[in-house]
């Protein structure tokens, strides 16, 4: 059994759609994020919930790490899937570290 039930999918388009389908196959809820330009996209409709990130430029939406983390917290996601591309984790990405929980345990973005 998984340690989490809800995953924020921090990507868009076909990649996000595949991740959302995989989450559903594993019995997980998927939360999509979207820019104004993508509000009617397939990944938004396929998700269990969706959070708007703002304007269409990626720097103001999909690549804005504070907005992604805020969306995950707002929707009570226990995990964040970065997908593929510029938002994927790198060794230097400070946000890609375990996030302490209240009772001393930690979770990790997947």
Image (cartoon, rainbow, N blue to C red):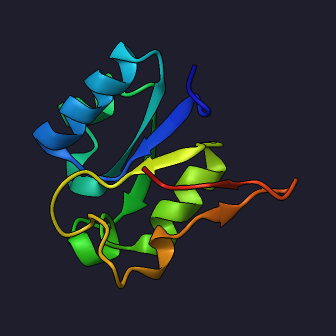
The residue sitting at 55% across, 52% down in the picture is 72
* Residue sitting nearer the eye, 88 or 17: 88
| Above/below status of 35 relative to 49 | below
Looking at the image, the residue that sits furthest to the right is 103
Looking at the image, the residue that sits furthest to the left is 14
The residue sitting at 52% across, 46% down in the picture is 79
- Counting labels gives 0
Residue 19's spot in the image, x, y percent?
Answer: 27, 34
- The answer to whether residue 6 is left or right of residue 34 is right
- The answer to whether residue 110 is left or right of residue 69 is left
- The answer to whether residue 15 is left or right of residue 82 is left
The residue sitting at 29% across, 55% down in the picture is 36
Residue 61's spot in the image, x, y percent?
Answer: 33, 67
Task: Please state, as top left, top right, bottom left or bottom right, where the N terminus lies in the image.
Answer: top right
| Above/below status of 94 relative to 11 | below
* Residue sitting nearer the eye, 37 or 66: 66
Residue 29's spot in the image, x, y percent?
Answer: 49, 25
- The answer to whether residue 29 is left or right of residue 45 is right
Write down the quadrant of residue 77 in the picture. top right
Residue 62's spot in the image, x, y percent?
Answer: 30, 64
* Residue sitting nearer the eye, 39 or 95: 95
* Residue sitting nearer the eye, 42 or 27: 27
Write down the quadrant of residue 63 in the picture. bottom left
| Above/below status of 51 relative to 94 | above
The residue sitting at 23% across, 70% down in the picture is 58
Looking at the image, the residue that sits furthest to the bottom is 92
């Amino acid at each position: 059994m998984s340690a989490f039930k809800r995953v924020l999918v921090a990507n868009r388009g076909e990649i996000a759609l595949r991740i959302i389908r995989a989450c559903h196959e594993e019995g997980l809820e998927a939360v999509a994020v979207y820019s104004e330009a993508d509000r009617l996209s397939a990944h938004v409709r396929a998700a269990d919930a969706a959070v708007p990130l703002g304007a269409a430029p990626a720097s103001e939406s999909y690549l804005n790490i504070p907005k992604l983390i805020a969306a995950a917290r707002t929707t009570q996601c226990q995990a964040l899937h970065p997908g593929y591309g510029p938002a994927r984790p790198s060794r230097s990405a400070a946000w890609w570290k375990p996030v302490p929980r209240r009772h001393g345990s930690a979770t990790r973005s997947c």
